[in-house]
Amino acid sequence: MRSPPAVLPLLVSLGALTAADGPIRPRSTDPDAASIRVSVDMTLVPVTVLDAAGRSVIGLAAGNFRVIDGSTPRPIASFSLEDQPVSVGLVFDCSGSMREKFLTARTAPAELYKQLNEGDESFLSTVSDSSVLRQGLTSNLEDIQNALIFTPPIGSTALLDGVYLGLTQLKMAHNPRKAVIVVSDGGDNNSRHTVHELTKLAMESDAQIFTIGLHENPRSAEELHGPQLMETLAHASGGVSYAVYDINRLHAAMGQIGVTLHNQYVLGYYPPPDAPSGKYRKIRVQLLLPSGLPPLRIFARSGYYAPEK
């Protein structure tokens, strides 16, 4: 079950997870994070707010946000801090490049699952020469941990194929909120799918992609490009990318994501009446705070497809 909140000045932050050398911070520098859903004519925009330590911040009000659709500011018609059941797909790199990290990495999902609730569900897809669905959607999260422990790290890395499988598998999920969590050193050298194909699928999906890049001692060209690839995957869906340079901090990153999944604001607004039907709409979500507060970071997807009229 989830950790209790830690109270900060003027704001409430959840999931205070740090290590001896400081907090784990998201890599993503763009204000793009959660998926967007459209309900009848109202557009619903999930928004994540993190503090400087990467902790989820709650306690904000509707007046602390501004939504701009195209070039037009839109009034916020509904506002909530949403805590709905979530379906989580875990895409785990089990290739040969993970061999030295794997003994520690394979136990990290336990920290994620400590933050989930009874109504949540998950599945496990592993990546090596190909992507394999090791455990289908289940609420028995111990099955996923067991499946991962008995999967050896061998072969090349079809990372993009694994994320593609994860996004398609989530189409069968039972919960309204969906997320894919990718754990990898970021190297890909054996996928059939391209980055372009995957980013297009991610932009059209209602699932977020969280990535945890394990970038300790990169050795190959693919691993050197790992940080950029992991950030690209997260950005395409409006997710958050975490960079881990010490394998022992992977557990803390997993726990942070688990808390974040259950602490997102949802802003509802009506698009401009002249918004073209079925077209991609660019939006911006801004955070409005009084002076003197500690720095906060906002994550909200930068666009959505308007519903057909």
Image: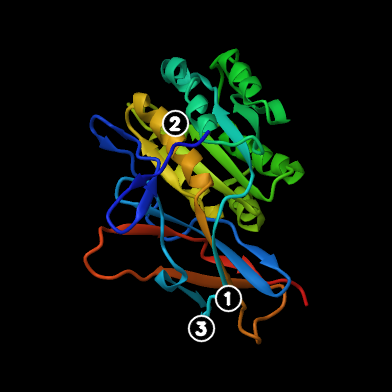
Q: Dividing the picture into quarters, in which one does residue 248 lie?
A: top left
As drawn, 266 above or below 99 = below
The three-letter amino acid code for the residue at tag 1 is Ala
Residue 247 is left or right of residue 240, and the answer is: left
Q: Which mark lies nearer to you, 1 or 3? A: 1
Q: Callout 2: helix, strand or loop?
A: loop
Residue 206 is left or right of residue 262, and the answer is: right
For the residues labelled 2 and 1, say whether their Cβ atoms are less than 8 Å apart. Answer: no
**Residue corresponding to mark 1:** 77
- Which of the two labelled residues, at mark 3 and mark 2, occupies the earlier sequence position? 3
Q: Callout 1: helix, strand or loop?
A: loop
Q: Dividing the picture into quarters, in which one does residue 303 lie?
A: bottom right
In this view of the protein, can residue 207 be seen by the observer? yes
**Residue corresponding to mark 2:** 185
**Which residue is depicted at the point 49% across and 56% down?**
33
Q: Position of residue 4 (x, y in %)?
A: 43, 39
**Which residue is depicted at the point 43% across and 18% down?**
104
Q: Dividing the picture into quarters, in which one does residue 125 lie?
A: top right
Q: Position of residue 11 (x, y in %)?
A: 34, 56
State the residue in front, 153 or 251: 251
As drawn, 301 above or below 140 = below
Q: Position of residue 180 (x, y in %)?
A: 59, 41
Q: Disc 1 versus disc 3: distance between alpha carbons?
A: 15 Å
The three-letter amino acid code for the residue at tag 3 is Thr
- Which of the two labelled residues, at mark 1 and mark 3, occupies the earlier sequence position? 3
The numbered disc on residue 72 is 3
In this view of the protein, can residue 54 be seen by the observer? no
Q: Disc 3 versus disc 2: distance between alpha carbons?
A: 40 Å
